[in-house]
Image (cartoon, rainbow, N blue to C red):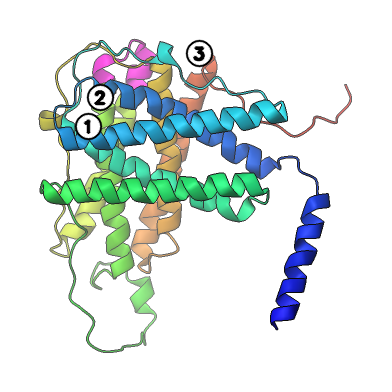
């Protein structure tokens, strides 16, 4: 068995030497997306650091900034070697480091915590589609660094009493099987929520809580009326979704505490630290994450009323996201992703 395994490895290595070393569409898409998101994050983190007073939270944001800058540098090097156009992304033109304080230290920490989840999903989803050795190595380092940053952030939240844990449920004490289809078809809320349903409701509530607070801050500072109106609408959607998810939890006597509030974590400053382009892009990223979260919640929810609600809420988010893209296109803010060859003749 050992000889066969070694033989297979040697054959693979021989094949790997001869295979096409060009980046695949999946690898280009992965690197391109990471570059754009990290260039946005660099702007946000640099602004946060101008106002954070808590030394522990400041250390976390500095660490997050360092990781984003390192990824941007690494991807830029790869693209130059492959003669691929480096995305424009977001630059110093998209952030005003002299703007007044807009966010509390606690908001900055929760923003990082929420961002880590999106980063983990991005890197983990890409992993099975990556074949080139250097990109696999890069991807592995991204996953490892995201986990380390998550651990660091979680530890600080626990130390400061800021961590809002998912709800507790009784420990299972015996094995039971489902005997009636009504367990799945329950529409009247009589059947208690299962652990996966509680986790999804909790996670989606927290994500929308971040979005609603961020949205309120953007509405205060955005220059364009179109942008203000769009983000205001998104903030209302987030608040509505939180209410729906909280009602599910509340009906089971489960806690629905949110980590952030506009009154405590957003100042009254109207001086914008970010360009309208960056704020629209930030909401675009959150729309993608929100729709993905709802999509993942559907197959892990066994109550049909939850499935119905997630489906309609996801449709609402997708329609909202489309409207946002139209505003981005109108203002020449939407950078075109890499395309396949255009082979049709005029």
Residue nearest the viewer, comparing 54 with 259: 54
Q: Nearer the viewer, residue 47 or 193?
A: 47
Q: Residue at x 29, y 21 (%)?
A: 47
Q: Is residue 163 visible?
A: no
Asked whether, in this view, residue 195 is left or right of residue 140, the answer is left
341 drawn magenta: no
The answer to if 225 sits in the magenta stretch is: yes
Pointer 1: residues within 10 angstroms few (<14), some, or many (20+)?
many
Residue 85 vertical position relative to residue 196 in the rendered view, above or below: above
Under tag 2, what secondary structure? Answer: helix
Q: Secondary structure at mark 3?
A: loop
Locate residue 232: give its quadrant: top left
To which residue does mark 1 refer?
Answer: 58
Camera sees residue 325: yes
Q: Position of residue 211 (x, y in %)?
A: 30, 35
Using the image as rendered, state which of residue 96 and residue 216 is in the foreground. Answer: 96
Where residue 225 sits: x, y (%)? 35, 12
The residue indicated by pointer 2 is 49
Q: Which residue is mark 3?
A: 331
Q: Earlier in the sequence, mark 2 or mark 1?
A: 2
Q: Residue at x 45, y 17 (%)?
A: 91
Q: Position of residue 287 (x, y in %)?
A: 42, 37
Q: Position of residue 125 (x, y in %)?
A: 53, 52
Q: Residue 307, relative to residue 179: is it above or below?
A: above
Q: Residues within 10 Å of mark 3 (few under 14, many from 20)?
A: few
The residue stretch that appears in magenta: 218-230
């Amino acid at each position: 068995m050992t000889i066969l395994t070694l033989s297979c490895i040697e054959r693979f290595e021989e094949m790997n030497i001869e295979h096409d070393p060009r980046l695949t569409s999946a690898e280009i898409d992965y690197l391109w997306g990471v570059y754009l998101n990290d260039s946005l994050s660099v702007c946000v983190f640099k602004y946060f650091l101008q106002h954070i007073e808590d030394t522990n939270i400041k250390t976390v944001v500095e660490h997050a900034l360092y990781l984003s800058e390192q990824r941007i540098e690494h991807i830029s090097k790869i693209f130059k070697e492959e003669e691929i156009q480096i995305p424009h992304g977001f630059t110093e033109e998209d952030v005003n480091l002299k703007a007044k304080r807009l966010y509390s230290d606690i908001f900055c920490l929760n923003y990082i915590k929420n961002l880590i989840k999106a980063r983990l999903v991005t890197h983990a989803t890409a992993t099975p589609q990556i074949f080139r050795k250097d990109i696999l190595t890069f991807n592995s380092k991204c996953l490892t660094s995201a986990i380390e940053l998550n651990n660091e952030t979680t530890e600080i939240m626990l130390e400061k009493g800021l961590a809002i844990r998912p709800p507790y449920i009784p420990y299972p004490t015996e094995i039971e099987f489902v005997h009636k289809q009504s367990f799945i078809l329950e529409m009247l809320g009589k059947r208690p929520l299962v652990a996966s349903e509680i986790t999804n409701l909790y996670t989606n509530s927290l994500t929308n809580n971040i979005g609603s607070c961020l949205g309120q801050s953007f509405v205060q500072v955005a220059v364009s009326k179109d942008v203000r109106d769009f983000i205001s609408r998104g903030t209302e959607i987030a608040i509505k979704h939180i209410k729906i998810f909280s009602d599910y939890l509340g009906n089971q006597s489960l806690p629905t505490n949110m980590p952030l509030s506009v009154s405590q974590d957003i100042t009254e400053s109207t001086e914008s630290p970010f360009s309208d382009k960056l704020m629209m892009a930030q909401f675009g990223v959150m729309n993608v994450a929100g729709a993905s979260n709802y999509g993942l919640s559907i197959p892990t929810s066994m109550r049909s009323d939850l499935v119905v609600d997630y489906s309609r809420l996801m449709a609402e988010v997708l329609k909202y996201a489309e409207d946002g893209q139209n505003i981005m296109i109108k203002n020449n803010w939407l950078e075109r992703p890499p395309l396949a060859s255009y082979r049709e003749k005029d």
